[in-house]
Image (spheres, rainbow, N blue to C red):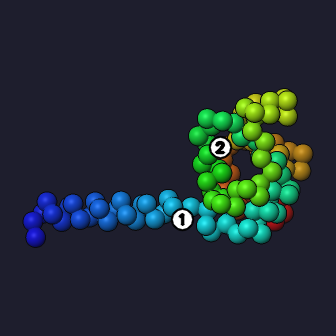
Amino acid sequence: MSKKSLVTILIVLGVIILSIIILNRGNGVSEKDTRCIGQNSVFYVQLGCHACEIQEDMFGENSKYLNMVDCYREREKCSEITHTPTWIIGGEKYQGVKSIEKLKELTGC
């Protein structure tokens, strides 16, 4: 096998592995944990916010259980929000993407 063929095979395998990782993002977050986080927080996002998409993707299909407010469509609910994503948990603001573990800690889930 030539060196060029080996490199091609390794690249293809890398792309396949990366695709599997991306497609399975959020599958490790249980529905129970997501529901708990959603019940104990408000997640402010905005149309076109890449960081918001990253945060939402962490929950995968379970993101539907989050208490989300889109500041682009619901501006009246976002008068106190200066950056997105922002989480309001226990009356405190947390800006930026947060890990699932951090959100569980902050919400007591």
Residue 70, above or below 60: above
Identity of the amino acid at label 1?
Asn
Instruction: Please tell me how many numbered marks the rendered image carries.
Output: 2
Q: Residues within 10 Å of mark 2 (few under 14, many from 20)?
A: many
Which residue bears the numbered disc 2? 52
Identity of the amino acid at label 2?
Cys
| Nearest the eye: 51 or 73 | 73
Q: Is residue 107 left or right of residue 5?
A: right
Q: Residues within 10 Å of mark 1 (few under 14, many from 20)?
A: few
Whole-percent x, y for residue 25 in the image: 56, 61
Query: Which residue shows up at 65% across the image and 60% down it?
Result: 61
Q: How far apart are labels 2 and 1 at the CA level?
A: 18 Å
Query: Which residue shows up at 77% across the image and 54% down it?
Result: 66
**Residue 24 - label:** 1
Residue 72, above or below 97: above
Whole-percent x, y for residue 9 in the image: 23, 65
Query: Which residue shows up at 60% across the image and 48% down it?
Result: 54
Kindly indicate the quadrant of the structure image that contains residue 80. top right
**Residue 68 - label:** none
Query: Which residue shows up at 90% across the image and 45% down it?
Result: 91
Q: Is residue 65 left or right of residue 29?
A: right
